[in-house]
Amino acid sequence: MTDLTKELNRSQGIPFLEYKQFVMRTFFPKRPSSTTRPNVEEGITMFSTLLNNKHFLITFVHALEQQKDFAVRDRCNLASLLTIALHGKLEYYTSIMKELLVDLIDASASKNPKLMLRRTESVVEKMLTNWMSICMYSYLKETVGEPFFLLLCAIKQQINKGSIDAITGKARYTLNEEWLLRENIEAKPLNINVSFQGFGMDSVSVRVMNTDTICQVKEKILETFYKNLPYSQWPREEDVELEWFPGGGYSSRILQDLDNTSVMEDGRKKLNTVFHYQVAHHDELMETKKSHRHSHRKKVLPEIYLTRLLSTKGTLQKFLDDLFQAVLSIPPEKPPLAVKYFFDFLEEQADKRGITDPDTLHIWKTNRRFAYNPTDKVEVAYGVLIVRSEVLEKKKDSPTNKLLYAKEIPEYKKRVQSYYKQIQEMAPLSEQEMNAHLAEESRKYRNEFNTNLALTEIYKYAKRYRTQVVNALDSNPTARRTQLQHKFEQVIALVEDNIYECCSEA
């Protein structure tokens, strides 16, 4: 454990992403188009005014969700676009989210209330995920972030101490039996001395396995030299070449995963490894810009494999315990206000509906995974190299992991219950206190996002479902009284006229 802790020593701290990058990766995993049409400012401004009308926005969301072709992906995208468009008014955004949640609770209460919030399949569920991510960003960065990142690094470090199949991603050391490398491949570590273009003349010792492919060696070299920089600033493996100087001489050769020395087996070429090239302990290598990458990561467990899983678990247990301690502790100087506010809201809704089953309320809270949302994908919060999540994942419901964590799971459950009780016993938050907190969050990150782009993307949904939105507004007495249908039609006419004029001028 001490050795692993020493190996994880980082001179430059944790590479957290800045708030804007964090938000964009959380809200838009695949990133929306950044193009928008010119000359629609007036119409989009009017549309923004409509979105800031509670009756219009709630009717608009419900109208879209009732359409069969408005898929889950569209719902999540709309929720994230609304979060960006209303980021400067988080108090208003929160009030809309709560009203939509009440509608969701009403719909769930008549069916199976325990399933509510289990998945992110509605606009409001994604809005809630985004809201929690915004409110918990500082908490993640200042409290939970470091132990979570160190756990990630520790797992990766442990995995790298054994063989990893370059094609399947299966590893000798893992916590997931599905990704356990079952072949008995003997691997020996060796240290190579590597110099890197742009890092001066001094070489650095890099620990590799003799079973590593050349691309795997490149990964380890890049991580050694760039570990204190965000992953987005690293060169890619395909952009670097690995040059080997056998015996420290002047002659050299370029090492590749596949070349004319590759061994044929059953009609297929084997990837070249450190052992294949006979690279020796303390040999000199140089990494320079440019190469080609070949990487396609795409039962009853024998006792020998269970022993290996237990060994890996034991090595990593401290880091896992540290993470649980950070997640399930309430810092008195910075309590998680968003969690308190949301949990109180759920309790209030359960009380109003006469839901007295404590398990239902517990499941609602747990389904939302308040501390897990910002960290379910490590690339969302950190500038790090993404390791196959399946290799790292601790699947608590698999038979093997129930056995692996048989002793810890009851204790973890008690700690979660205790955490929920502590949150419940915190002094209630008034609407004024929460609104002040939300206003501060909005102020801190003012002008971070292109709200006009978000509004334009939302408008595309409004145009696509124009008839359905108009009918929904016409059926709503409040919307009819305030002429929201007419105002919506004005927006459509104004934007489409501007677009038509632009096309005519072109």
Image (cartoon, helix red, strand yellow):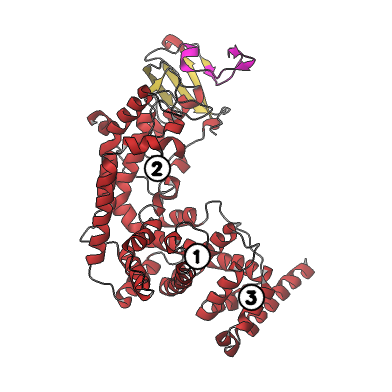
**Residue 264 belongs to the span the image colors magenta:** yes
In this rendering, the label closer to the viewer, 3 or 1: 3
Question: Could you tell me which secondary element the residue under label 3 belongs to?
Answer: helix
Query: Is residue 426 shown above or below 311?
Result: below
**Residue 213 belongs to the span the image colors magenta:** no
Left/right of residue 336 with respect to residue 272 in the rendered view:
left
- Residue at 75 percent across and 73 percent down: it is 501
Q: Which mark is residue 84?
A: 1
Q: Which mark is residue 469?
A: 3
Pick the quarter of the image with the N terminus.
top left
In this rendering, the label closer to the viewer, 2 or 3: 2
Q: Are marks 1 and 2 in contact (CB under 8 Å)?
A: no
In the image, farthest residue toward the bottom: 481
Q: Which residue is mark 2?
A: 397
Residue type at numbered disc 1: Ile
The image shows residue 128 at horizontal and vertical percentages of: 44, 63
Q: CA distance from mark 1 to mark 2?
A: 36 Å
- Residue at 26 percent across and 72 percent down: it is 428
Left/right of residue 118 with respect to residue 418 in the rendered view:
right
Residue 445, can we see it?
yes
- Residue at 41 percent across and 54 percent down: it is 373
Pick the quarter of the image with the C terminus.
bottom right
Q: How many marks?
A: 3
